[in-house]
Amino acid sequence: MQISVDVGGTFTDFVIVDEEDNRLMIHKVSSSGTEPYKPVIDGLRELNIDVSKVKKFVHGFTIACNTIIQRRGAKVGLITTKGFRDVLEIMRITRGTAATLYDSQWEKPKPLVPRPLRMEVDERLNSTGKVLKELDEEEVKKTVEYLKNQNVQSIAVSLLFSYTNPIHERKIESIIRENFPETCISASVDVQPEFREYERTSTVVADAYVKPIVGKYLRKLHVTLEELGYKHDLLIMKCDGGVMTAEVASEYPIQTYLSGPVGGVVAGKFYSELTGYRNLITTDMGGTSFDVSLIRDGTLSYSSAGEVEQGVPIRMPMVDVRTIGAGGGSIAWIDLGGALKVGPVSAGSDPGPACYGKGGTEPTVTDANVVLGRLDPNYFLGGKIKLSFDLAYRAIKHKIADITRMSVYEAAQGILDVTTSNMVQAIRRISVEKGYDPREFVLLSFGGAGPLHATAIAKELDIGKIIVPPYPGATSAMGLLLADLRFDYVTSHLTKLEKSNLDAIREIFGSMIEKGKEMLRREGYSGTPLIFNSIDMRYEGQSYEINIEIPKYVATSITELQEKFDQEHNRLYGFSSPDALHEIINLRTSIVGKSKLTDMTKFIHKNTKRKFLKTQREAYEEGSKDFLKHDVYERHNIPFGTHIEGPAIIEQVDSTTYLPAESSAFIDQFGDIAISMKK
């Protein structure tokens, strides 16, 4: 038996695979903002699972990300090189998004470490790692004593040029462990050994900020699972689409900050291979957020950097996922200018949308879908949660319709329109702004709320095909089980390509590869790993680099690397400069141990029933601006090969799919709902 659990902002999703009986079960429980581990244990007890028979348990969560966004992390001290105390305060020159660019009252976000806890030590290396000034160990001891007296819970260490020579950071680590053993330590040479001191310091500080919280959560969860009989490692999803043990995740918790959303993208890669659609846009709409990523030519899109929020850049290998506050629980509101807005604030699971009847009074996207007849109040989560039409209607009337002088139904449709616009903009940022045409992609829609909004998104972007997987509400959790063991390494190697020694570069790659293989052995992996190498490069004089994939053993010549870079630069920016000097910035390696569970289709129930039309229901049709009769189907009663014409609603325990009049659907051989948009 294998289990994956994805803790979201509103619901915690379970996928249970029983290989002996070829069974797959899904389950949902409400998440808890105060005790995030509790729904995991509650769900296992509700399912009456014998945990001693579970051989693999994979977990995804957003605790690290939420801790930073909500500023609820540990009290952190920073030790850095003399003169670089204020690097976090200075930040980059960018002003952020268009929303803040023209805001005269915009204030720079506060660093995660206040200035009194940012400490300098008198030491210095040069850019090649040569010691220019020895570390004053007595000064370090006094600094550690000061931070101890300030009751810090965690200490981040980030020294200038430490990525070329870790000697001083290692000495500081040793002094901290000797004089302040109870504190957590995050050192940049372990967390993020790359050049650019601002991003490196920000990343290691973020790691230190979440380390006590994530470590405590994982220890508590693992101990509780062991008490229930679990005998194996608890595996955690990482930002790069691989998994690691809870022990490693506790050491490097910042690697989990996109843990939850990445699971859905990994599942998207599986569906790309399954269906043959090589270009997919994955969209995961849950209760709190909307996560979007690209799968191009069957491969995941990666990034070397992200930003939890403005002012907290994170630099590490990660699946390129963009997240906005647009989920079923996103709150609709009227701004000072009278415009209708939706999100980013969410009602969460407690009190939740007004229709939950748990005391919430703010109108949300879920309330709008209830009022418009797209959600059955008696069949939410298969009837597990009863929704109130009256409470949803009242919230939209008082907070939106009465203020804007619209009808309640117009206001509800307006909420959905604004939400669609927000989601479309997120997709354009990850596709159009990177030179990709969304019309050349298939939309893979999942998450509990995703299939309700997929056709509206496709219509706006002129996308002709949508795939809704068999269990959309649990697709991210399913991706956790499909994830591989993966370790990523980076070494800064600033040099001109034309003057480089390829043998020296191969030696650096060889060292990183051996380190990754050793980590796989530590994790118990015995197969032959996959190895992916790449180089961050730029033209001389440029400020930022682009990543170039290369063969396992680098390349046969410098000319080959030059041509690879020139081609990619031309694809991204429409021009190249072959005569310019090429600079190498970073060398990157990914070591991947493939998951043994590679096919989930054998667990999908193939229905042979013929009675699958459930009922008819009046629902608001945007095109006609009126309520029309919609055929309502029970998804898992629909035989494979069935065609369905819109307008229609397809219901299942974990989600609802909405088909407007200008669409039709086909249940393919894998159990997916393949939706075609009519021109």
Image: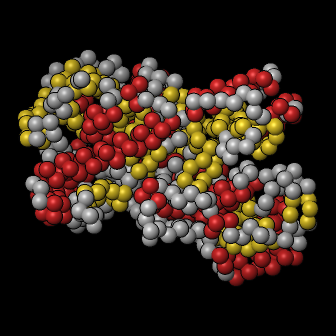
Which residue corresponds to the image point at 35% horizontal and 44% vertical from the top-left? 423
Q: In front: 258, or 109?
A: 109
| Vertical placement of residue 581 versus 324, above or below | above
* Residue drawn where x is 35% and y is 60% of the image: 345
Question: Where residue 200 sits in the image (x, y, percent)?
Answer: 69, 56
Name the one closer to the observer, 675 or 255.
675
**Image quadrant in which you'd find residue 605:** top left
State which quarter of the image contains the C terminus: top left
The picture quadrant where one finds residue 341 is bottom left
Q: Is residue 88 left or right of residue 560?
A: left
Q: In the shown orientation, is residue 35 left or right of residue 378?
A: right
| Foreground residue among 230 and 120 | 120
Q: Residue furthest bottom?
A: 149
- Give left or right: position of 374 versus 333: left
> Residue drawn at (12%, 56%), measured in percent from left and top?
406
Does 153 sit left or right of 13 as displayed? right
Query: Total number of numbered labels?
Result: 0
Q: Is residue 492 above or below residue 120?
A: above
Q: Position of residue 133 (x, y in %)?
A: 91, 65
Q: How is the image coloured?
A: secondary structure
Residue drawn at (25%, 59%), measured in percent from left and top?
339
Image spot of residue 253 (x, y percent):
61, 55
Question: Is residue 188 or residue 58 the one in the foreground?
Answer: 188
Q: Is residue 29 visible?
A: no
Tell me if residue 120 can be seen. Answer: yes
